[in-house]
Amino acid sequence: MNETGYGIFAARMLPKDEPFVQGHRACQGCIPALMLRQITKAIGRDLIVCSATGCMEIISSPYPFNAWGVPWIHVAFENAAAVASGVEEGIEVLRRKGRFYTGRKPAVLALGGDGGTMDIGLQALSGALERGTDFVYVCYDNEAYMNTGIQRSSGTPMGASTSTSPAGRVSTGQVTWKKNLAEIGVAHNIPYVATACPSYPFDLMAKVKKAVEVKGPALLHVFAPCPTGWRCDANSGIKLGRLAVESGLFPLFEVVDGQHKISLDPATMRKSSQDPIGEIAGYLFQQGRFRHLKGRDELIQAIQERVRLEWQKLKAKTER
Amino acid sequence: MKNRIEVGKPVGIEVSIAQSEVVAQCDVDVIAAYPITPQTHIVEHLAEIVADGDLDAAFIPVESEHSAMSACVGSSAVGARTFTATCSQGLALMHEILYIASGLRLPIVMSCVNRALSAPINIWGDQSDIMAERDTGWVQIFTENGQEVVDQTICAFRIAEDRRVMLPVIVNLDGFSMSHVIEPIRFYDTKQVRGFVGVYQPPLRLDPAQPMMFGPVGIPEIYTEAKKANDVALIESRQVIEEVWAAFAREFGNAYRALETYRTDDAEYLLLTVGGMSETASVAIDALREQGVKVGQVKLRLWRPFPHDDLAALLGKARGVFVFDRCLSTAGPGGPVASEVKTSLYNLRERPLVVGFIGGLGGRDVTVQQFADMVHKGIGYVAAGAAPVYEMVGVRE
Amino acid sequence: MKTKLNPTWRELELGCTVVEAGTSAEYKTGDWRSFYPKTDEDKCIACGVCYLFCPDHSRHIAPRKKKVEGAMYTHYFDFNFQFCKGCGICAAECPTGAIVMIEEGKK
C-alpha cells in the first residue's frame, strides 16, 4: 500500500459503483463530467452534493432526468458553500438531538466551476472555510464560463481568447493572470487543500478521500479541460490535462495542515530538456483559444516565465 | 427546556428579545443570520441563548444575508427547523434566494424588522423592504405590537411546516418603533409552545438512504406547472393559517384574523393601515368618531396570501377607502398596498373611491392629527368624486 | 422511471423534487455519436484505461479471460453504445492503440 491509498493502480480494482449516472448531457469529451465520476467513485454513496449553477448542474439535472445516485441540491450560482454550511450544520444538530442521520455522518460535497468559485462564489466559499464547515469544496476549473458561452472568468489564463476576452486586431485575449485558488484556500488555514486533475485519476481519488476524511473544510482545485470551450478535439482533454501538469502550468500538490507537498514533479517526467517555450507551446497550440498567439513569442515567453516563477514559489514552500 | 421567562402574566421586555425567546421556545435547530440594524437584538439574543446552552441549535454566523438564506435553505433541506432574521438591504440581498426557498417548499421562518431601503441610506422604519419581496412566494404576516410578534412567530412555525403548506413564512415588525421598544408581553409555558408547534418531520429531505434531487432544471415543459403548484399552495395556505390561528386562540387565548377591524360597523369611510402605525391610526379613529365622522379602521395582517375576497366584502360597501402605505412605488400606481386594494375592488359593480396616502418613510413619524387629516382629505376627495394617484403625507414642499 | 415526463401541476412532487435517483439512465446519449470506438481484441490488454477515462462511463467491466502472448488477461471493458457519445478519449488514451474511431454506418 502506498500513500495514495491504493495498493495497485488498476482500473479493475476501483469501486465499480457509479454514483454519477449515465445519460448526463455533458458535451463529448467533457473532463468535468469525468471528474464527477472519479470523485463519486472515491467517496461512494454516503454523500450529499450541493451544486452551484454551472455546466455540471445543468447537464445532470434537466427535469426529470437525475444523473445522481446520491442526494443532490442546487440553489443558485454563488452560494454552494453557504448551502453546504447549512446542510452540514443541520445534519450535525439533528444527529446530536438523535432525530436523524444517526448512523455514519454523510460527507458533504460542494461543487462549483471556476466562475462559481473564484468569481461570484468566492465570498461564500471564504465564509464556509473560515467558519470551519466540515465539508469538501471541489472547484472544477475549465477556465471560463462555459455554461453561458465561454466568457472569461478570473480562472481564465493569460492569452486565452474567450467570448468576453476575444483576441482581436489589438487584443491578445485575456490580459490577466489566473487566480491562485489553492493558495486562497491555504490562507484560510484549513486542514486540507489540494490541486488535482482527472488525467491523474488515482491521485485525484486519493486526494478526494483524504479531503473527506479530514475534520473541517477541505478545498480541491481540479483542472478540468473543456474541449468545447478550449476549441480542441473532443478526445484531447486527458492529454491536455497531462500537458498542463507536466509543463508546470498546473502543478499537482497538496497542503496538509499548512504543509505544502508536491504530488508530481514535472521535472522527473520530462523526457528531454526541451526549449521552455516549446514546452508551453506544445500545450497552447493544441487549443483554438490560444491560436492567435502564434508568432507572439514575447507573450509566450512571459507565460513561460510566470510558470517558472510560480513553480519556484511552490517549491520554496515545500522546503520550509 | 425550562421557562427562561415568567409565564402567564405580562412582563416588560424588549420586543426583539421577546421574539428571540419565543423562537427558542419553538426549539429551532438552525439559526443562520447576518447582523443588520435594527434586526441585531434578535440574533444577538438568540446567540446568547445558544451560548448559554438553553437552546440546542446550530448558530451559523454567515458572512452575508445572501449566505444566511442559502444556509437556511441547506439546513431546511436536511429537515432542520430553521430561523433567520433580517431587513432592508439584507432582505434585498436575499431576494434571489427567497424565491428558491419557496420554490423548493422549505418551511423557513424569518423575522423581517421592516426598515427603509437606500439611497439615501436610512436605518429607520418603513415597509419598502418587504414590499419589494411581495412576489417571492412566502407567506407574509404583519404585526402591530410585541404580543402579536410573539404569537405570530409561534404560529409561523406551525403554518410553515404544515404538510398542506410547506412554505416559508415572514413575520414583519416595525424597525425600532416596535423592535427596540419595551412592551408588556405575556409568555406561554415552553412545554405548551413546543406541543403546539410539534417536532418538524419533513416529507422530503436530503438523505443518502433515499437519494433525491432538490432543484432540478425547470425546462419549459415543467416550469409553468412548478409555478402553478406553488401558487396554489400559497393560495390554499390561507385555510391552514385560519386553522392555526383558531387553534392558537383555543390554546393561548389571543385570536387573529387576516383583516382586523376597528369601529367599522356603521362606517362610511375606512382607513386601511398595515403594521405598527395602526395603533396611532386607531387613536385618530376614536377622535374622529367623537366628532361624528363615520369612519372605521381595517388593519391588514395577511399580506400574502392576499385576502382579496375578504377585502372586497369588507370594503366594497364603503363610500371611501383611505389606504396608508409606508412604501413608495416610484412613478407607479401609488403605494403597493393601495394598488392591491384597488385591484381587489375593481371588478365590483359598485365600489368605493380608493385614496392612497404615503408616509412614515425612513422612520418619519406620523401623528394622530396627520391620520385624522388623511381621513378628512379622503372624505373631500370622495365628495369631489376623484383623487390623485397618491398623496404624500408630511413632506416639506 | 416512475417519474412522469410531462406531469400536470398536481402530479409534481413538492418543490419540483425528483424523488427518483439516477433517472438519467433512461436518456440515451448514444445517438449523439458520429464516430464509434472499435476494439482490436488482439491488441487489447484489458488495462482499463478506456474505462478510467470515459466521461460517460460507457464502458463496463466484462469478466472474461484471454491469453495474449503467454499472459492471462481478465476483466475486459466492453462498450455500452447506448451512452457512448463518441468523444474518442478511449482511442486517444489506449496505450496499445487497440481502439480506433470509425464513422457511424461504416465498419
Image (cartoon, helix red, strand yellow):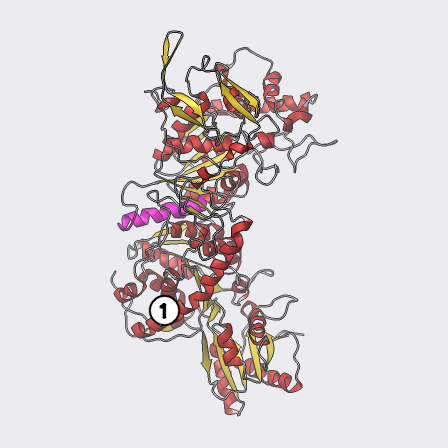
Image location of residue C25, percent across then percent down? 44, 37
Tell me which secondary structure the magenta stretch mostly adopts.
helix
**Residue A37 in the image, given as x and y percentages of width and height:** 44, 32
In this view, the residue in front, C105 or B289, is C105
Q: Is residue B260 visible?
A: yes
Task: Judge the density around disc 1: few (<14), some (14-19), many (≥20) Cα neighbours within 10 Å.
Answer: many
Q: Which residues are magenta?
A: A81-100
Q: Is residue B205 above or below residue A184?
A: below
Q: Is residue A84 magenta?
A: yes
Q: How many marks?
A: 1
Residue behind mark 1: B244
- What is the x, y in percent for residue B255? 37, 76
Q: Chain of mark 1?
A: B
Q: Residue at x 41, y 50 (%)?
A: B61
Q: Height in image: B21 above or below A268?
A: below
- In percent of the image, x 42 and y 35: which residue is there? A20
Q: Is residue C69 above or below residue B98?
A: above
Residue at 69%, 26% (x, y): give it.
Answer: A292
Q: Is residue B343 magenta?
A: no
